[in-house]
Amino acid sequence: MNHFNGKSHSNLQSIQFNAFFFSSIIFLHLTQLLVFPFVLLLNNTLVAHLRLKYNCLARKTFAIILILVTQIFAPTNLVLTSDDSIDLEKLVRRDKHGKVIAIDLPSHSIIMANHQIYADWLYIWSLAYLADIHSALIIILKASLKWVPIVGPIMGDRQERPDDPAEPASRPD
């Protein structure tokens, strides 16, 4: 009998996860769709600046959604180790109870991952969140992956640049 209760609980948790995660992603995507017409109609420096700000907000929100989902449905501890050249205690900020509340990473960093497993992404987003730089994470994708339903447009929101080889001739003159 316990086997069925465990399976029922697992199924319920799976349904809750999917409902929460996909409704959050769809809401974020809908806000992108609401902003999109303004980008097309008002193509000037102010709109470009606002678009950049909005893209940062969208990336930040996406990171928060991933971290929140992880904390609710698969809570875990992140353990950092390093060699002797880095004093981790100097990088970590703690509250009065000793709990880690932030990480002081350098202001300019490049973090690369080959994402062999999806946990790699979560580690990077968690570190970026603790360093309060999660709005600056940019995912570099194959151009075709931005068309993956639901999550592709959110991850592929990088700022287009005139010299961007991944976007040839896609910019209006």
Image (cartoon, rainbow, N blue to C red):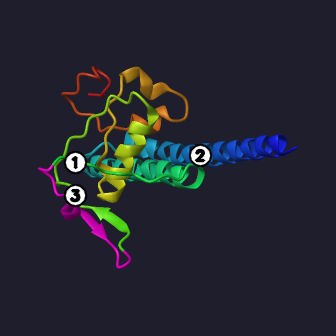
The furthest residue to the bottom: 96
- Find out whether the residues at labels 1 and 3 contact each other: C-beta distance under 8 Å: yes
Q: Neighbour class for label 1 at 10 Å: few (<14), some, many (≥20)?
A: few
Q: In the rendered image, is residue 16 in sight?
A: yes
Q: Amino acid at mark 2?
A: Phe
Q: Magenta residues, as a range?
A: 84-97
How much space separates mark 2 and mark 1, taking CA atoms? Answer: 33 Å
Q: Quadrant of the C terminus?
A: top left
Numbered mark located on residue 88 in the image: 3
- Find out whether the residues at labels 2 and 1 contact each other: C-beta distance under 8 Å: no
Magenta region includes residue 95: yes
Mark nearer the N terminus (1 vs 3): 1
Q: Secondary structure at mark 2?
A: helix
At horizontal 52% and vertical 43% (from top left) the residue drawn is 29
Mark 1 highlights which residue?
82
Mark 2 highlights which residue?
21
Percent coordinates x, y for residue 82 in the rendering: 22, 48
* Image vertical order of residue 145 relative to residue 112, above or below: above
At horizontal 50% and vertical 42% (from top left) the residue drawn is 33
* Image vertical order of residue 71 relative to residue 154, above or below: below
How much space separates mark 1 and mark 3, taking CA atoms? Answer: 7 Å
Magenta region includes residue 168: no
Q: Amino acid at mark 3?
A: Leu
Mark nearer the N terminus (2 vs 1): 2
Q: Neighbour class for label 2 at 10 Å: few (<14), some, many (≥20)?
A: some
How much space separates mark 2 and mark 3, taking CA atoms? Answer: 33 Å
* Residue 21 relative to residue 98: left or right: right
Percent coordinates x, y for residue 47 in the rendering: 31, 49
Q: Which residue is at the front of the view, 124 or 160?
A: 124
Mark nearer the N terminus (2 vs 3): 2
